[in-house]
Amino acid sequence: MDTIIAIVVVVAAVVLVVAIASLRLVQQYQRGIVFRFGRVLDANREPGLRVIIPLVDRMVKVTMQTVVMPVPAQGAITRDNVTLTVDAVVYFRVVDPVKALVNVRDYPGAVLQVAQTSLRAVIGRADLDTLLSDRERINTELKAVIDAPTEKPWGVLIERVEVKDVALPDSMKRSMSRQAEAERERRARVIAADGEYQASRRLADAAQAMAATPGAFQLRLLQTVVDVAAERNSTLVMPFPVELLRFFDQVAGRPTGTAAAATPPTGTEVKLTLPPLVGAGA
């Protein structure tokens, strides 16, 4: 009787051990790949509690989550012969777990090496200005270059590639600073010259409008007298008729042409600067 009980206990223990060894838990973010006698089974094990044959099957779990991999800083030379250091970050995930396990060994390390070489190659084909201003195009080209050898043969999809930082030499930074300063100075001069040109055009239009209206000269003269009188100084502005000058020329016996040449144009302002008078409040 004792022998039968012992045999039953041993069989039950063996069955329990085999049952425990045949159970595998696959998480929601994982997929299970079963190797039976070294060959991959066609069906992948979905998330949940799965059963395999002990000593016959071997299950390998592959993470389907997106992996964020930083790419170490790489020294590169741009197309316009500028030496710089660039680092990036790669976002990828496994889309075919069988290819990721069978076709490549250590697929994260393989993706890292491809990203490093592709980063140097893309930087070598781009100009410095493009690298600094059009970062999106560089990221798109990097993604295409890295994704080409990894998606179909390795079952790894490159979701996104971003250039994190571009380190320039100090001499290049100083040169770029001087270039930016010169460019701002050039634009300031162009704006000032354009303002002067527009002001001259407006003054020319105003002169033509005043020439068409003789009374406008007198009004402008009176406005000038008001502006000068507003200041506390000893300057007197006296409107002097041009006809009176011509009369004096005729009385003096000068020729008409000479008087006309010496006579100032109509609306001439004669300014007399007088010394301040004591007690006059000038």
Image (cartoon, helix red, strand yellow):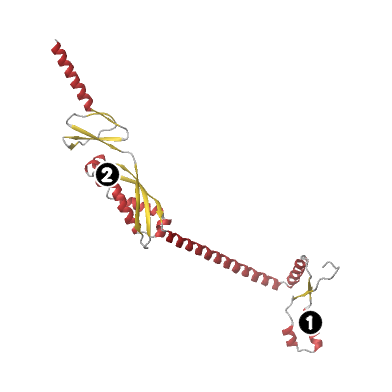
In the picture provided, is 37 more to the left or to the right than 236? left
Q: Label 2 crowding class (10 Å Cα cut-off): few <14, some 14-19, many 20+?
A: some
Q: Identify the residue at image location x=26%, y=40%.
A: 97
User: What kind of element bears circle 1?
Assistant: helix
Earlier-in-chain disc, 2 versus 1: 2
Residue 83 drawn at (x, y percent) = 37, 59
Kind of residue at badge 1: Leu
Residue 220 drawn at (x, y percent) = 74, 69
Q: Identify the residue at image location x=21%, y=21%.
A: 16
Q: Is residue 155 visible?
A: no
Residue 231: quadrant of the picture: bottom right
Query: Closer to the camera, 3 or 229?
Result: 3
Mark on residue 143?
none
Judging by the rendered image, the residue that carries numbered circle 2 is 107
Q: Identify the residue at image location x=19%, y=20%.
A: 13
In the picture provided, is 1 more to the left or to the right than 141? left
Name the residue furthest top. Answer: 1
Q: Is residue 258 visible?
A: yes
User: What kind of element bears circle 2?
Assistant: helix
Q: Are the residues flagged by discs 2 and 1 in contact, CB closer than 8 Å?
A: no
Residue 59 drawn at (x, y percent) = 23, 34
Judging by the rendered image, the residue that carries numbered circle 1 is 245
